[in-house]
Image: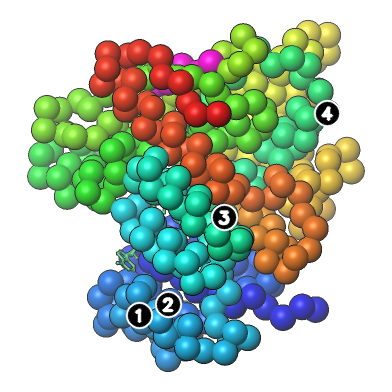
Amino acid sequence: MPKKIRLGILGGGGDSLIGVLHRVASHINDNYQIVGAVFNPVMEENIGFAEEIDVSTDRIYVDFETMIVEEMKLPEDERIQVCSVLTPNFLHFPMAKKLLENGFNVICEKPMTTTYEEAKILQETLEKAGTVFAVTHTYTGYPMVRQMREMIKEGALGNIHKVDARYYQGWLNPVIHEKEKRSSTWRLDPEKSGISCCMGDIGVHAFNMVEFTTGMPVKSILADLNYLYEDNQMDIDGTALLRFGNNAKGIVRSSQVATGEENGLAITIYGDKGGFRWEQENPNHLYVMSDDNPMQVYKPGHAYNSDLSLDGTKLPPGHPEGIFDSMANIYLGVARAIRGEEYNDGEFPTMMDGVRGLNFIEASVQSHKEGNVWIALDS
Ligand SMILES: NC(=O)c1ccc[n+]([C@@H]2O[C@H](COP(=O)([O-])OP(=O)(O)OC[C@H]3O[C@@H](n4cnc5c(N)ncnc54)[C@H](O)[C@@H]3O)[C@@H](O)[C@H]2O)c1
């Protein structure tokens, strides 16, 4: 059994949404051990949380700069090997950049940065560093999402002509209508969130899902966003029409004011030979449609699935695995990359996905602000 990979964590404290997902995911396949962290910017809470989850407080640091300086003083075989960046968006870039410059591997939450320019700088930094970098588009780790990608590669849908990705949440509805509430959430503060809330937070997951599953790069987009109130600087709902390079078209529909919706990410892909439908809230069912046969339901763990899909399933069919397992699959792929083992390029989203995501987010805002015009994405 290879030794556990020494994991550092930035953000993701006890008060956070996403911290628990990464912590549990990192443990699921027995590959990682958390050895150092800045869970929280308030040292007392930082230490308190480390004690709560039994991480040695010797390596709990006051901020990320101190963490990097102190870790670099340690012998290489004790130092953090990979660091997960789980803070609000504006901190991803400075944290990830400094980690890469010092030779660390990085697992970074999305959106990877707050601007496209920062994303490209980070890409250059990674090229120099030559380390492993993953962006946690969590949903790509689901076995049935992986199955779509592999079946599409093998031509199961023929030529794809239409893709519809939808990501509807309702959590901002109780927040957005009151001025005081809407000015106190970091996701609606451009200083912390970047230029977009809805497209930056969830539209980008849907966009990534489109490119991840189809393998078709989006060439241009036309977006229409909604800000709802004059004083609100951030989109809370948005639709982007997509054009691919082969007359195929698509749509990303996303909203955080879809009242009553929970985490409604779904994708439907239509080709001349068939179609796929998959929904995040029911992730173990992949619906396969065709002109000639009744609809089929593919499920995880069966031998008819691809190697990539089966690699993401731990138990026999009928034992539901979910979001923690999906993120764990991403961590498993990263562990293989760090150890220099072979892995499938569908095992985790990379720097390129992060860069494409920021290109999409900025183009969405630009398209909307220029009067809903088509904007080309970089190839
Ligand atoms: N992959 C996904 O599906 C997914 C889901 C939710 C959130 N996210 C992303 O994860 C990131 C965090 O989101 P969240 O909802 O957990 O946010 P959150 O506000 O719930 O938690 C942020 C955490 O970062 C900590 N923090 C803030 N400033 C810090 C600093 N200077 N140093 C160290 N820690 C600091 C906070 O104390 C808190 O623990 C965001 O970028 C978000 O887009 C991704």
Q: Pointer 4: what residue? A: 154
Which circle's residue, 4 or 3, is located before the other in the chain? 3
The quarter in which the C terminus is drawn is top right
Q: Does 249 appear in magenta? A: no
| First in residue order: circle 4 vs circle 1 | 1
Q: Mark 3 packing: few (<14 Cα in 10 Å), some, or many (20+)?
A: few
Q: State the residue at coordinates (35%, 75%).
A: 65
Query: What amino acid is found at the position of numbered circle 1 in the picture?
Result: Thr
The residue at which mark 1 appears reads as 66
Majority SS type along the magenta span: strand
For disc 2, the marked residue is 68
Position of residue 271 measured from the top left corner of the image (x, y, whole percent):
71, 14
Mark carried by residue 34:
none
Find ligand 1 in the image and state its quadrant: bottom left
At 74% from the left and 14% from the top, the residue drawn is 159
Amino acid bearing label 2: Ile
N-terminal label among 3 and 1: 1
Would residue 289 be visible to someone looking at this image? Answer: no
Pointer 3 with pointer 2, Cβ within 8 A = no
**Residue bearing mark 3:** 127
Q: Residues within 10 Å of mark 2 (few under 14, many from 20)?
A: some
C-beta proximity under 8 Å, tags 1 and 2 = yes
Tag 4: residue type? Glu
